[in-house]
Image: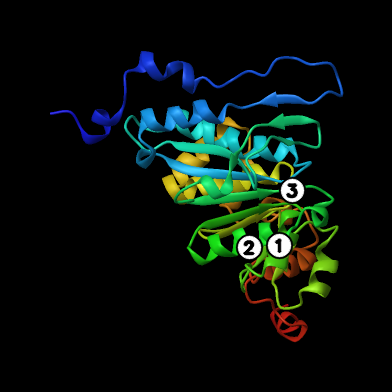
Amino acid sequence: MPSRASQRKPPVALILPLLLGFQPSLVPPGQIQHCGQPKLLDLRRVLLDQKWMIDVDLLLLPRFPMLSVSGIIEPLRVANRELPAGDEPFNWRFVSLDGEPVASSSQLLLDTHALADLKNVETLILLSSYKVQEVASRRLMGHLRELAAHGTALGCVDTAVLVFAQAGILGNQPISVHQEVILDLRQRYPRQKFVETSFSFSPKLFSSVGGVATVDMTLSLIAHHKGEALANEVARILTRPEWISSQGRGWVLDDEVLKSLDPVIAKTVALLRDNLEEPMTAEALAERM
C-alpha cells in the first residue's frame, strides 16, 4: 500500500511548472522590478497539501535587504533538494502588512501576501532597512506581539531587532545585534541581553546581524527542524564550513581562530564566549585566569 506521504503528492507533470520558480524579466537599471506570484504559490500549496510543508514566512518592510532574503530562501531551497523522498519540505512566502508589493533597497519589487490573511503562522522572520523607525508602526508591533503570544517562532535580521525590542517580545534570551548599534540598544533597553555574535538561535526566537550571517541563522533553523546532518550538508554545499565548525553557536571567533591569538587573550575570549547566557563579572573572570 502506498505510504501516506506518497498518497499526498500530486502528479509531477502537474506541479513541476509551479515548483521551478518564476524568473523576473530584465528591466533598465534603476527601475523597480516585480517578482513573485502569490496566487500561483497558493495553488502550489493546495496541490502539495499545506499540512505537508514547513512554512517560513518572510515579513518584508520597505527597503528590505535582498542579500538577507537570499540568505534565507537559498539554504531552504538546498535543504529541500537534499531531503529524503517523502519528507516534509520547507515552504517560504513573502509577507507584508497590507499584501501590496514591497520594494527592496535595490529596487526589486516582491509581491506579498497580507499578514492578516495567513492562517497558522509557524515561523516568521522580519526583514527591515536602515530607516526601520519610519515603518515600525503600532500595527506592526501589535501583529508581532500577537504572534509571540500564540507561540509563533520569530526571527529578525539586522535592524529588525529594533522592532522586536520596541514591541517587547525579546524576553531574557540573548539576541545577536550588529556591533554598530549594540551600545545604543543596551542603553535604551538595559534589561535585554544583546550579544555581539553573528547570529543567535533558539526554537522560538532567533536573529542575525545581517549579510551572510543570515545563512548561518537559517542553517540553525534547518537543523532544528531536520537535524544537524542535513544542516551541515547544506552548509557544505553553500561553502559555509564556518557554521559546521562552530556547531551553530554563531560566534565570529571560533576555536580555530582563537588558536592564532595570544594564549591569555584567547582564554579570556573563550570564557566570555562560553558564558553569554550568564555573563561573567570582572571578578569571576579574573579568578578563572
Neighbourhood count class around disc 1 (C-alpha, 10 Å): few under 14, some 14–19, many 20 upward: few
Verify CB contact (< 8 Å) between mark 2 and mark 1.
yes
Residue 242 visible, this angle = no
The circle on residue 138 is 1
Q: CA distance from mark 2 to mark 3?
A: 17 Å
Q: Badge 2, how many Cα within 10 Å: few under 14, some, many 20+?
A: few
- Kindly state the secondary structure of the residue where label 3 is placed: loop
User: What whole-number distance in Å separates the C-alpha atoms at marks 2 and 1?
Assistant: 6 Å
Q: Amino acid at mark 1?
A: Arg
| Helix, strand or loop for disc 1 | helix
Q: Residue at x 36, y 17 (%)?
A: 12
Q: Is residue 107 visible?
A: yes
| x then y, percent, for residue 263 | 76, 64
Percent coordinates x, y for residue 278 in the rendering: 63, 77
Circle 2 is placed at which residue position?
142
Depth-wise, is mark 2 or mark 3 nearer the camera? 2
**Left or right of 116: which side holds 53?**
left
Q: Residues within 10 Å of mark 3 (few under 14, many from 20)?
A: many
Callout 3 amino acid: Ser
Q: Is residue 14 left or right of residue 235?
A: left
CB within 8 Å, label 2 to label 3: no
User: N-terminal of the two: label 1 or label 3?
Assistant: 3
Is residue 284 positioned above or below 70 on the image? below
Q: What residue is shown at x 48% (from left), y 63% (from top)?
A: 150
Could you tell which of marks 2 and 3 lies nearer the N-terminus?
A: 3
Q: Tell me the residue that label 3 is attached to.
A: 128
* Depicted 102 relative to depicted 274: above or below: above
